[in-house]
């Protein structure tokens, strides 16, 4: 998947979760990505994040600590 598409998808989740209280939003982003993104997508997500995370909304960056890294 293209990095731009992955960033777009993560930000879509964040936009929805930004309507929730902050802690709930962070947990919601992480939970959604953990539950619905396959390991290859999560691996690519962490590659984007480690390269600077350009374009990722702040809520996505905060949620990264709760997202499972694929092995």
Image (cartoon, rainbow, N blue to C red):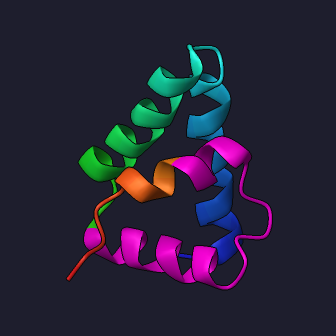
Is residue 58 a member of the stretch shown in magenta?
yes
Residue 1, image x and y in percent? 53, 75
Residue 23, image x and y in percent? 49, 26
Query: Is 40 positioned to the left or the right of 61 in the image?
Result: left
Residue 57, image x and y in percent? 73, 48
Whether residue 35 is visible: yes
Is residue 51 a member of the stretch shown in magenta?
yes
Q: Residue 13's image quarter?
A: top right
Question: Start and end of the magenta stretch?
Answer: 39-62
Point out the residue furthest to the left here: 71
Query: Is 16 positioned to the left or the right of 33 in the image?
Result: right
Whether residue 2 is visible: no
Residue 31, image x and y in percent? 33, 39
Q: Nearer the viewer, residue 45 or 5?
A: 45
Q: Residue 68's image quarter?
A: bottom left
Reply above or below: 56 against 48.
Answer: above
Reply above or below: 24 against 45.
Answer: above
């Amino acid at each position: 998947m293209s990095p731009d598409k992955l960033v777009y998808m993560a930000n879509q989740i964040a936009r929805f979760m930004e309507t929730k209280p902050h802690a709930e939003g962070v947990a919601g982003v992480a939970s959604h990505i953990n539950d619905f993104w396959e390991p290859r997508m999560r691996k690519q997500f962490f590659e984007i994040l480690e390269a600077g995370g350009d374009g990722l909304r702040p809520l996505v960056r905060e949620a990264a600590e709760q997202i499972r890294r694929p092995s």
